[in-house]
Image: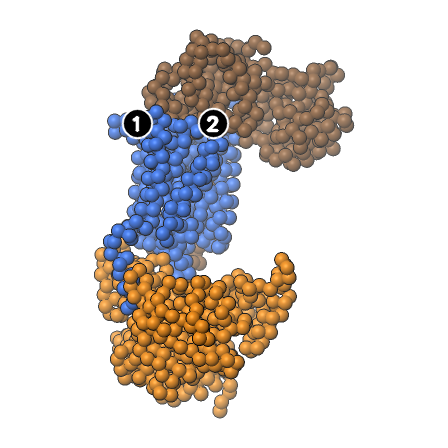
Amino acid sequence: MSTCILKGRNMKGTISLLIITLLVGFIALTGCSKKPSDKGDKSTKAKWTIGMSQCNLGEPWRVQMNADVKMAADKHPEIKVVYKDAQNDTLKQRSQMEEFISAGVNLIIISPKEAAPLTPVVAQAYQKGIPVIVLDRRVLGDQYTCFIGADNKKIGKAAGKWIVDKLGGKGKVVELMGLMTSTPGQDRHSGFRDGTKGSDLEIIFEADMKWLEPDSRKEMESALARFDKIDLVYAHNDPGAHGAYLAAQAAGREKNIIFVGIDALPQEGQAYVKQGILQASFEYPTGGKEAIELGLDILNGKKVEKEVTLSSRVFTKDNIDAGGEWLKE
Amino acid sequence: MTGICKSFSGVKVLSDVQFDLKAGEVHVLAGENGAGKSTLIKILAGVHTDYQGQISLNSQPVRFASIHEATAAGISVIHQELSLVPSMTIAENIFLGREKCRGLWLNKKEMTAEAGKLLAEIGLDVDVTRNLGSYPLSIQQMVEICKAIAFDCRIIVMDEPTSALTDVEVEKLFTIVDKLRKSGCGIIYISHKMEEIYRIADRITVLRDGEYVGTATAEELDRGKMVKWMVGRELNQQFPRHKSAPGQVRLKVSSFILPDPAGKPMPAVNDVSFSVRCGEILGIAGLQGSGNSELLNGIFGTYGSQAHGDFELDGQPYKPTTPANAISRGISLLTNDRKANGLVLGMNIIHNITLAALKKFSPFGWLQPNSETKTAAEQKEALNLKAASLKMSVDSLSGGNQQKVVMAKWIETEPKVFLLDEPTRGVDVGAKHEIYELMNKWTSNGLAIILITSEMPELLAMSDRIIVMHRGSITAEFDSEQATQEKILHAAMGIQTN
Amino acid sequence: MTKEKSSAKFAGFSAEHWFTSPTSRAFGALIIVFALGLLFNADGAFYKWGTHRDMLRAVSVYGILSCGMTLVIISGGIDLSVASILALTAVSFSLFTIHKGISTPIAILACLVIGALCGMFSGAVIARFRIQPFIATLAMMVFARGMAKWVSGGQKISTAVQQSDGTYKYVNVPQVFNFINSKVLGDNITVVTLIFVVCLIISWILLVKLRYGRYLYAIGGNEEAARLSGVPVGWTKILAYGMSGLFCAVAGICQAAQELQGDPEAGMAYELSAIAMVVIGGTSLQGGRGGIWLTLIGVLTIGYLEKILSINAVGEDKRLMLTAAIIIAAVLVQKGKK
């Protein structure tokens, strides 16, 4: 099998051939497909420059956030947005903020990786007169113009209430949780428990699937093995709900179980609802659009609220074509 | 030591062995591989704590529960397998385990100075702050010796201390031994080399198959008798060389130049030309740094295309590129360090024997374990390999048997030229004899052999022709009749003779 | 003579020998874990065949990665890039079949080639430039993950295809996904498990039946001795890493099929699980020893451990501590009577 036909000297040539084949073949086959579309580059007619500091673009939800910002900004030719991605590095995000400050942008939108390390630089910008909109994750103190974010506790509670309603007050529920060391996980859990308080719902199985679909599938398989009757699965995110669905489908029980997820990204949660995989998905809005709209208000001199809580929608088969249903506060 | 018995898992390794050592004497412990010498020494050194019998030190009965206790009692051992750390410096190695400290901090200065002094005493002039691994094996062995004598000891055990040393360094060692002897130290010396034994021994004790055979002074015990004690039979000729009529030129080397692998400016092999014929044994003599090992390795392709020169194999051009290429052309090399690069210690005997010629045993890449086992069994017979089972891993074999496995491996490649680098190093007398007989058989079949050996008598007896190397060049050429030890040594040291 | 006497006892089939062989030691750990399962059977869930079938399904992707890892570790190296190549091929396979509609056999072939090339590249760097396997495969790990994210645009490649106007069109899942995701032999075993078994058999043939396998063991045991015995060290290593990449591609295809999408973030930290499975099975990280059936035992041990913790709904924190404790126990059982 390994007859040494090519001798040592030809190794170099063969290596180069391997490298070239690898690169060329790969590019050819994938055909320069999707590129991150958010390299903002406007015409020079823009009146205002907005700096968008994103903590990472590894999560699809954050890619969506930037996409929402771009979509909203495209409608307003008087603003130009510059995007910076900190690749989940706190120090990098800090220096990128400092770059925005020294470039003298008119407004900053930041979704910080962590609160404490980025509070000083946000305050610095704010005190220099650059309005700062903090998006989705908080900083400490009050040295910023306004905070826009959704409330995971509220969403969890709304989900809980919806589930109680759907099941008529009683039933056997499996809860598949996101990373319980993260705030969203804890909030979506406590909100859910809050929303189901007082009902006859029985949480028969709960597990931490760390936001990951394969892990969620494994946990659901265990639940299916243990319990003959499961009425509903509440997963903290849509991939988790999807994984649970696949496990149920493999066991032939998917038609008897209701699946509920959170996030409702168009190509994910909403798609799953459209396809009948999920019965409900609760939107965790990115706030990208709202950030641009409020930003424009600020730049135009209007006064804005310090705390803006984004409202969320629930998507079900019934209302998906109508664009979901807004949750009442 | 009296009445010493030791068993491993029910197998008696030593039975009723006695041994005594006087202050200021060199007492040689002799015997074939597997006779029990190492085990006896390990009991004395505190390595084996589970044994029957009595040991008394200065008329006081002792029983060591650990190596530490033995060392504290003044017993120091130089092992055959070097117990050094290549990635540490010489100074660090010498003081390994006994570092000099000032409170919590290592006293590096003092240790470096001491190490330098110690080495100077034995005439070794090297930089003690360089890593040990960058020095050749002979220097490493001298450091091992240094380590053992660095601390006050009353008993020193030397187990094959000269196996990697050149003649010059061996003399240095004997000077140390003399000094120690005069200072009242008792020395237990294990060796296979006849000359050494008779050179330094006051008394000789022989063990055979774990049993005590006898003790005598060096004068009383002549070689023949000692060998008889060791093997239980008379060996008439220590070196049985049957010369064959040499045939055509098998390998011709012209203007061979090899740059130094360690990067030194002087080439390791400097414009060497020679040839060797079928059925001939060409001996290459040389001291440390003469380049003889590098010469063989260069021909074999170890250094790849760094070896420049013209080579002809049976009249066909040959270019050293890789070992695989050399093997396919019929050149095989038995290296001088079987554990480092001759054997795969984790594999069993069969797999080691078939490794270099595996293509023979695997048509289309598919292994044929039955034919491998059969071949290995045949080799076991032919080479008189002592092993309980062919499926044993080679690291449990004795040195001589390990060497036989390596030889079997190369025999399987059916070489035309056999390069042997120290083939009898660390091999007992009986096995050595067998190897010499093998060499005879091979040459009578037309094989050409190039032999490197640091044992002068072996070189003189077995070679048909001898070339001597010094610092990369050939300084002399002799026919076996003309050669004498003095002439060879002169040429090896680069001394001009008229 | 005396040394040989002591070895004679071991060479035969004495019971003592069997109990201390690596296979039986690895079995020991597996038996302990299995016993734990019988003990903590979660209201009888452990007795259902479905639970075991699901465990095999879940562990198959890891197992396929472990096959390649076994080859590489026996050769004395390590491959940290397995998870990233898995992600890259998962994304590529989804891209080819779902979005570009390339026929399944060609898509599979292309992905296998991608995986193999990545592996061979690592192997070439290790063999030719003498870079340590840890470093070289670490670099490939980062590179392949980056490629995966670039090719996918950071998003999961799923049946929701984004059109140029921002809306989504939904296509059907390709047949091959459903096939790999399905059960056969009367619903008793999943297709991915069968694929895992095929990979095991291929690895077995490579390691035990072919000359190539002997070369791998020799290089892992003593690379210099192997080289000086004429073993083609360079090519053997390149092939080992290439095979690892190939197995990663198979795993990536299975992963995509099971998720019904290609996720550029797939397989995070899978390489550590693969290494753990190989090591717990008894293959030494130093190389030159071990085998594929040992790896299988390691795969099952960890697979069962995770399943038992899962059906008993053990909290995440306790899970981590228990897993660590049992891994150490398993390794100690192995070191036992060396």
Q: Residue furthest bottom?
A: B498
Residue A279, image x, y percentages: 44, 14
Q: Nearer the viewer, residue B65 or B163?
A: B65
Residue B227, image x, y percentages: 31, 80
Secondary structure category for the residue under label 1? loop
**Circle 1: is it few (<14), some (14-19), or many (20+) Cα within 10 Å?**
few
The residue under the point 33% across, 32% down is C38
Tell me how the rendering is colored. Answer: by chain
Residue A319 visible at all: yes
Residue B263, compared with residue A141, is above or below; it is: below
The residue under the point 46% across, 64% down is B67
Residue B423, by quadrant, is: bottom left
**Circle 2: is it few (<14), some (14-19), or many (20+) Cα within 10 Å?**
many
The residue under the point 60% across, 64% down is B100
Residue B163, image x, y percentages: 43, 74
Please tell me the numbered disc located at residue A208: 2
Please tell me the numbered disc located at residue C48: 1
Q: On the rendered structure, is A307 left or right of B152? A: right
Q: Chain letter of disc 1?
A: C
Q: Chain C in the picture: what colour?
A: blue
Residue C203, compared with residue B11, is above or below; it is: above
Q: What's under tag 2, amino acid-wise?
A: Asp
Q: What's under tag 1, amino acid-wise?
A: Lys
Tell me whether marks 2 and 1 sit on the same chain: no
Q: Chain B in the picture: what colour?
A: orange
Secondary structure category for the residue under label 2? strand
Q: Chain A in the picture: what colour?
A: brown
Q: Nearer the viewer, residue B437 or B25?
A: B25
Q: Residue furthest front?
A: B60
Residue C314, compared with residue C73, is above or below; it is: above
Q: On the rendered structure, is B323 left or right of B359? A: right
Residue B147, image x, y percentages: 52, 70
